[in-house]
Image (spheres, grey):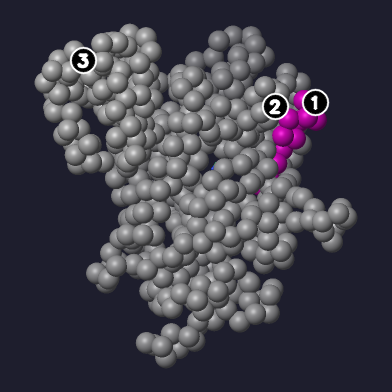
């Protein structure tokens, strides 16, 4: 497993080289905050999505009452009636305070900017830099050193969030991408939703938004699901899909992008039981990420401070984030999933705005009420990044110098089949094995270049097992299995290969 001590540039370059992920519209110079998933990236992301769907919807965990949970799936529209976003609080509240640089026209999220100054010196200049960005910090330090005309020791430096600065201090601050002082504006609100127009006429009446989260589609369908599925509270509705946020500073590869995917569950329960379910879901979701191979040292739960709580969470008892130690946050952690106690905020607001009754009649309790909601909201794109980071394993001894240690469940290619040489009946036998296996799993056939180069390609693709047909195979009907992580080799009968794989997948 990876100790995460590699540079993100190495991972980004492997992702591009091996067809996992590359910038969207790359031939036109890309578009900041948008990414395309190549053949291997698509398989990897789909495997993560399918694992979530299987473990949460098809075979959900057992609840605190030892009963299996009931969770149903949904696929709602990306564009909904714009009243949805007024009710949800996104139109009024889905804002991040932003800071603009008047000189470079760059725009930053205020809570992502930090400042560097000389300890105890309130008269000099202050230098802003981007959080978790070593290059930006190094540049701020260089500019500060130049300003005071000497090299500064670590102990002499003072840092604080930009949001802690007074207006006087902001006036003597130099932005991350300029050398001029006082170009940063005070933080102001900025709506992160992408706006579009529905129909031929483009005016305020036809304005609509691309959803910034999948959750609201679930709330809008709460009544439909109760009416059609014979579900009883407590139950959950799950959805996977695209979400769009016009992030001000998209960065760290796919960690913060403008188009991404989420995997969300809304768990509806009685208000009296919500605290118990909240605790349950925090445990379930953290263990789930660990079950996929994220080492427990790299995963932690963090409770949101009261000033971070989203508009909905104020009614509930808070939010816990499942965080992962990404290479660019290490030794710190970055959010992978939020588990929020939303109270009855969403259903109450949609009742108010739509004037439709969303109350639930609980026969067992003989009570009519608005269910409370626990929401485990995970990033599929961010999860894919965490899986890529965890799998990235440098190994100077190998031809590829690195291999991707995906768990077999998530590996985009489950196995590869090679003829040792491309002649003497070996390709025919290997092709036959490949054809048999690919009916059940994504399996690749490769006959090009030396066997060493083929292993190297599969190591970078994170393929757990390679099966090689050699001259002995023709006589004794056996193949060599090469294990990606241990590099061990063993021989088994060609007829046993399918069963061998089935046991491990
Ligand atoms: P952040 O504080 O990082 O902006 P958030 O708290 O706004 O995230 P939520 O609204 O809770 O995020 O969304 C749930 C999940 O969706 C996050 O845990 C994350 O995995 C994912 N997510 C949110 N914004 C982005 C983004 N811009 N790019 C990729 N994934 C995202």
Quadrant containing the N terminus is top left
- Marks 1 and 2 close (CB-CB < 8 Å): yes
Q: x%, y% of residue 87? A: 67, 67
Which residue does the image show at 52% across and 49% down from the upper left? 262
Residue 103: give its label. 1
Q: Going 18% across and 13% down the picture, which residue do you hit?
A: 471
User: Is residue 152 rendered to the left or right of residue 179?
Assistant: left
Considering only order in the chain, which callout, 3 or 2, is on the residue closer to the N terminus? Answer: 2
- What is the x, y in percent for residue 172? 73, 28
Q: In the rendered image, which quarter is residue 219 located in?
A: bottom right
In which image quadrant can residue 326 be found? top left
Check disc 1 and report its element: helix, strand or loop: loop
Where residue 193 appears, as percent x and y from the top left, is: 69, 50
Q: Nearer the viewer, residue 135 or 394?
A: 394
Dot 1: few (<14), some (14–19), or many (≥20) neighbours within 10 Å?
some
Magenta segment: does it hold 106?
Answer: yes
User: Is residue 129 shown above or below 316?
Assistant: above
Q: Are marks 2 and 3 in contact (CB under 8 Å)?
A: no
Q: Which residue: 16% across, 34% down?
A: 496
Is 167 on the left-hand or right-hand side of 216? right
Residue for badge 3: 470
- Residue at image mark 2: 175
Q: Is residue 485 visible?
A: no
Residue most extreme to the bottom = 366
Q: Earlier in the sequence, mark 1 or mark 3?
A: 1
Q: Which residues are magenta?
A: 96-107
Q: CA distance from mark 1 to mark 2?
A: 9 Å
Q: In front: 445, or 372? A: 445
Residues at marks 2 and 3, CA–CA distance in whole angstroms: 63 Å
- Foreground tag (1 vs 3): 3
Judge the density around disc 2: few (<14), some (14-19), many (≥20) Cα neighbours within 10 Å.
many
């Amino acid at each position: 497993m990876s100790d995460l001590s590699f540079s993100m540039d190495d991972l980004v370059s492997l992702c591009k080289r091996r067809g996992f992920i590359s910038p969207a519209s790359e031939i036109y110079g890309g578009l900041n905050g948008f990414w395309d998933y190549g053949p291997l990236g698509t398989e990897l992301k789909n495997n993560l999505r399918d694992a979530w769907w299987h473990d949460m919807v098809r075979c959900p965990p057992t609840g605190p009452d030892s009963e299996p949970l009931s969770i149903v799936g949904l696929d709602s529209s990306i564009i909904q009636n714009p009243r949805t976003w007024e009710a949800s609080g996104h139109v009024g509240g889905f804002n991040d305070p932003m800071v603009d640089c008047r000189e470079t026209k760059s725009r930053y999220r205020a809570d992502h900017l930090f400042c560097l100054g000389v300890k105890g010196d309130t008269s000099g200049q202050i230098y802003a830099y981007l959080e978790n960005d070593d290059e930006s910090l190094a540049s701020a330090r260089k500019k500060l050193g130049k300003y005071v005309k000497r090299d500064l020791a670590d102990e002499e430096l003072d840092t604080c969030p930009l949001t802690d600065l007074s207006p006087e201090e902001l006036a003597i601050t130099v932005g991350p991408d300029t050398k001029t002082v006082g170009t940063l504006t005070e933080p102001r609100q900025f709506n992160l939703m992408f706006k579009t127009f529905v129909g031929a006429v483009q005016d305020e009446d036809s304005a609509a938004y691309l959803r910034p989260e999948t959750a609201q589609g679930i709330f809008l369908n709460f009544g439909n699901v109760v009416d059609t599925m014979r579900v009883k509270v407590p139950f959950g509705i799950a959805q996977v899909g695209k979400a769009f946020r016009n992030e001000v500073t998209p960065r760290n590869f796919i960690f913060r992008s403008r188009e991404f995917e989420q995997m969300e569950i809304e768990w509806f329960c009685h208000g009296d039981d919500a605290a118990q379910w909240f605790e349950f879901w925090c445990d379930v979701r953290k263990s789930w990420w660990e079950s996929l191979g994220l080492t427990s040292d790299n995963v932690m739960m963090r409770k949101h401070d009261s000033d971070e709580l989203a508009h909905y969470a104020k009614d509930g008892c808070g939010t816990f984030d499942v965080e992962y130690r990404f290479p660019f946050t290490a030794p710190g952690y970055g959010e992978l999933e939020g588990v929020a106690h939303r109270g009855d905020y969403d259903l109450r607001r949609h009742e108010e705005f739509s004037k439709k009754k969303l109350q639930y009649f609980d026969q067992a309790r003989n009570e009519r009420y608005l269910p409370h909601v626990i929401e485990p909201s995970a990033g599929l794109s961010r999860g894919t990044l965490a899986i890529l980071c965890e799998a990235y394993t440098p190994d100077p001894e190998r031809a590829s110098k690195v291999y991707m240690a995906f768990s077999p469940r998530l590996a985009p290619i489950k196995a590869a089949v090679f003829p040792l040489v491309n002649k003497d009946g070996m390709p025919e036998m290997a092709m036959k094995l490949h054809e048999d296996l690919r009916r059940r799993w994504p399996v690749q056939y490769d006959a090009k270049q030396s066997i060493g180069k083929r292993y190297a390609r599969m190591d970078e693709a994170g393929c757990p097992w390679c099966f090689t047909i050699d001259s002995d195979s023709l006589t004794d009907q056996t193949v060599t299995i090469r294990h990606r992580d241990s590099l061990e080799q063993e021989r088994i009968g060609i007829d046993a290969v399918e069963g061998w794989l089935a046991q491990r997948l």
